Image: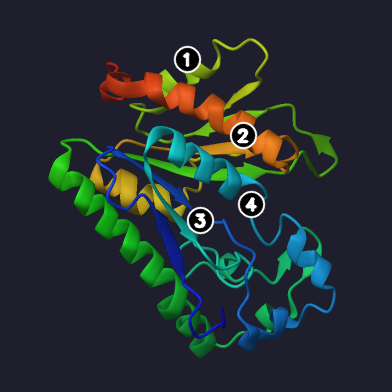
Amino acid sequence: MTDSTAPVFDIQHPDSDSALLLTVDHASRHIPEKYNNLGLTDHSVLARHIAWDIGIEDVTRRLSDKIGATAIYARFSRLLLDANRYPDDPASTPVMSDGVEIPANRTVSTEDREERVETYFRPYHGAITDLIEKKCAVHEVPLLISMHSFTPVMNDFERPWHIGVLWDRDPRIALPLLKILRENSSLVVGDNEPYSAREPMGYTMNEHGMKRNIPNVAIEIRQDLIDTHQGAEKWANIMADALSRLGPLAMYEPEGRDER
């Protein structure tokens, strides 16, 4: 498939009657030919975590099939344009990523940045909006889960968590999901770890979840646990079990806001 026909996103189970929508902002490491790998001469860099969320597409595709949920996948690398950052954030076209310089992003023009936004970002998020509208027409309360993966080590710190549940002001999915996952004593489950969704918040959760009062959460799974098909299958099963038990728990509204 050539760049001219390569999709900006793809959708799994678009007509599912499930209330759940899974989004995968960093599913792909693809950079169209016209960008010449963003000036990166070492093409192996594109296999690293800086270009995509390793393993999470494999997990999500398996998970989507297991529970019959709709899932949408961005088909462009976060190095070209980060689908989970606001377009006016300079980090949406990173100049440096984990010590690697991205040459073409150092000199990116305003026009080039806007072209990337119009070509990739807006169609992808427009498709998410359309899917949410479709869910809202059928379900009183659709559910939004943003799927991601994280590196085992960052800044020489070995991250102990197997999975993290990231959330801000909306506890409707986060608190029951944390409870369900923590029933498995073999799992180290992070509450807003290894990142916090509270400051700053990613574009997908904020724009499609918080601003529309749709229950939302981000899931982060450690990459060394899902970088094989066997690992992806294991974690798809873990997530399928947890989400199948979520059900009406996601409608739960505790009194007051957790102000940790």
Mark 1 and mark 2: Cα distance apart in space: 22 Å
Please give the residue where the numbered disc 1 appears in the rendered image.
179
Q: Can residue 258 be seen in this view?
A: no
Mark 3 and mark 4: Cα distance apart in space: 9 Å
Rendering coords of residue 169 (x, y %):
37, 34
- Specify whether 254 is left or right of 78: left
| Mark 4 residue type | Asp
Q: In the rendered view, would you say 58 is above or below 243? A: below
Q: Residue at x 71, y 79 (%)?
A: 37
| Mark 2 residue type | Glu
Q: Is residue 18 visible?
A: yes
Please give the residue where the numbered disc 3 appears in the rendered image.
25
- Specify whether 71 is left or right of 6: left
- Specify whether 254 is left or right of 65: left
Rendering coords of residue 79 (x, y %):
64, 68
Looking at the picture, tell me which residue is in the foreground, 241 or 207: 241
Q: Which of marks 1 and 2 is in front?
A: 2
| Mark 1 residue type | Lys
Q: Do the residues labelled 1 and 3 touch (CB within 8 Å)?
A: no
